[in-house]
Image (cartoon, rainbow, N blue to C red):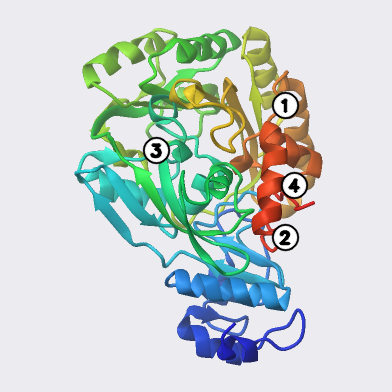
């Protein structure tokens, strides 16, 4: 520990803001500073936490110093990339926020089709930059998501069936561990840690840079197809998605049609399937792949067209939705399950309620279950149940609804995607890590025995 850092630390669980300013200067934001409220605000509304200090790191040296401050002071450490944690793990109440959002360096090697990316980049920023060369790495479905969090959790997005999870394209990483060391990790250097960060979340350190594989993904056939939602159409839609070529990935939501000017007035308030479709191969073949979905019913809206891949990420800055969300995997959605979805959506009093369906398989499923810490390679369908409303105090009404829907739809697959978990019980967190649990505990014990990195879906060192 440097002399400057030592003097900034007073007694246990306290820090000296003036002394820390000598280390971090304008990168440090304290509660009395202008911009504090904006800096502590995360993507999801209703999360109102007041950290003791926010530090916007400019490089891995800053990150190492912040980790030292957290370790020596005992204060809780929150690590923020894009701030999209549903559980609110991107901000601490009374602790330290390590904000990576200023770390946006991106080095593209077009010839080798690799990229070194700092973890403050968003999925949209990375995708736009790589798209200039007709290249892409698969992330999620939202452009403002930070690549740090989504990568560590696995990454299930628009290219999941064609190219797998985000972690399937992760070639190496630079990690700051709990003892403030900066480590390079890959398949041959610290391979246990490299395995663990691919699906084990932020339990083992702070990722400062990732090395990704890039794929040729230039023009795609993509966009939104909206169909009327009946139990028969929903079940048929899922069956077609499972039978579709692997180049086609779909994220579909069953919900009431919003009153958008672009939709027919007669459709407003009626149940629809809003399907975001991506065919990441020859556009001509894509038309053939999407035709079976168009034949299920007359589309309410059809905005599927050739486009650049990066165009999928629409701007979402300034939104702070308040929501209750549950995530789960299921084995099938037949007519009975589809009827259950419609029946429960009828009972919601939320401003907006939806059941999202992502058919998996393809490249994701071909990776060995023990190759990474993501333990759900064999899961067939991911479902997210969401109720969105205006005020946090409405949660008391809508939380029971999402719990009821989740219980009604639960099947044999008890797993969960850690990237979409809210604050959950220890048992549910263990289900999210499933068969990787014991191995993850061993890695945690080696790299973070004191559980410094605990503001996450935590794997305790025991």
- Which residue position holds label 4? 395
Q: Are marks 3 and 2 in contact (CB under 8 Å)?
A: no
Mark 1, secondary structure of its residue = loop
Q: Nearer the viewer, mark 1 or mark 4?
A: 1
- Which residue position holds label 2? 451
CA–CA distance between discs 3 and 2? Answer: 31 Å
Residue nearest the observer in this picture, 158 or 384: 158
Q: Measured from the top left, where is residue 322 in percent x and y?
A: 63, 50
Q: Nearer the viewer, mark 2 or mark 1?
A: 2
Rendered view: 299 above or below 61 = above
Q: Measured from the top left, where is residue 220 in percent x and y?
A: 27, 29
Name which residue lies at 55% across and 36% down. 372
- Which residue position holds label 3? 138
* Res 213 seen here: yes
Q: Measured from the top left, where is residue 389 in percent x and y?
A: 65, 45
Image side of residue 110 versus residue 105, left or right: left
Residue nearest the observer in this picture, 172 or 146: 172
* Res 391 seen here: no
């Amino acid at each position: 520990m440097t002399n400057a850092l030592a003097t900034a630390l007073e007694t246990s669980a306290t820090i000296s803001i003036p002394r820390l300013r000598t280390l971090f200067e304008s990168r440090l934001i304290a509660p009395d500073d202008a911009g504090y409220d904006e800096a502590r605000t995360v993507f999801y509304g209703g999360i109102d936490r007041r950290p003791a200090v926010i530090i916007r790191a400019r490089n891995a040296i800053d990150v190492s110093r912040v980790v030292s401050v957290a370790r020596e002071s005992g204060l809780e450490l929150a690590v923020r990339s894009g701030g999209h944690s549903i559980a609110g793990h991107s901000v601490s109440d009374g602790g330290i926020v390590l904000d990576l959002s200023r770390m946006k360096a991106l080095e593209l090697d077009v010839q080798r089709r690799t990229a070194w990316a700092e973890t403050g980049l968003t999925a949209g920023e990375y995708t736009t930059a790589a798209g200039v060369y007709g290249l892409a790495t698969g992330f999620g479905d939202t452009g403002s998501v930070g690549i740090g969090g989504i990568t560590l959790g696995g990454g299930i997005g628009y290219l999941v069936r064609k190219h797998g999870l985000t972690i399937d394209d992760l070639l190496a990483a630079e990690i700051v561990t709990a003892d403030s060391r900066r480590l390079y990790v890959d398949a041959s250097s610290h391979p246990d840690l490299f395995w663990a960060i691919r699906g084990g979340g932020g339990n083992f350190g702070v990722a400062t840079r990732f090395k990704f594989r890039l794929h040729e993904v230039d023009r795609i056939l993509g966009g939104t197809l909206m169909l009327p939602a009946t139990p028969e159409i929903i079940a048929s839609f899922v069956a077609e998605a499972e039978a579709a070529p692997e180049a086609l990935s779909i994220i579909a939501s069953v919900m009431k049609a919003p009153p958008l000017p672009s939709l027919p007035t007669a459709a407003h308030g009626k149940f629809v399937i809003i399907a975001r479709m991506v065919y990441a191969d020859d556009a001509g073949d894509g038309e053939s792949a999407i035709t079976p979905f168009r034949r299920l019913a007359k589309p309410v809206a059809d905005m599927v067209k050739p486009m650049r891949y990066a165009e999928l990420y629409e701007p979402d800055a300034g939104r702070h939705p308040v929501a209750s969300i549950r995530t789960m995997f299921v084995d099938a959605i037949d007519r009975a399950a589809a009827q259950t979805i419609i029946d429960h959506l009828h009972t919601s009093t939320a401003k907006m309620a939806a059941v999202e369906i992502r058919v998996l398989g393809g490249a994701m499923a071909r990776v060995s279950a023990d190759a990474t810490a993501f333990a759900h390679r064999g899961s067939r369908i991911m479902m997210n149940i969401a109720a969105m409303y205006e005020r946090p105090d409405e949660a008391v009404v809508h939380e029971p609804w999402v719990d009821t829907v989740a219980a009604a739809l639960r099947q044999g697959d008890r797993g969960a995607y850690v990237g979409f978990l809210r604050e959950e019980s220890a048992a549910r967190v263990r289900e999210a890590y499933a068969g990787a649990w014991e191995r993850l505990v061993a890695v945690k014990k080696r790299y973070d025995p004191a559980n410094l990195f605990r503001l996450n879906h935590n794997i305790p060192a025991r």
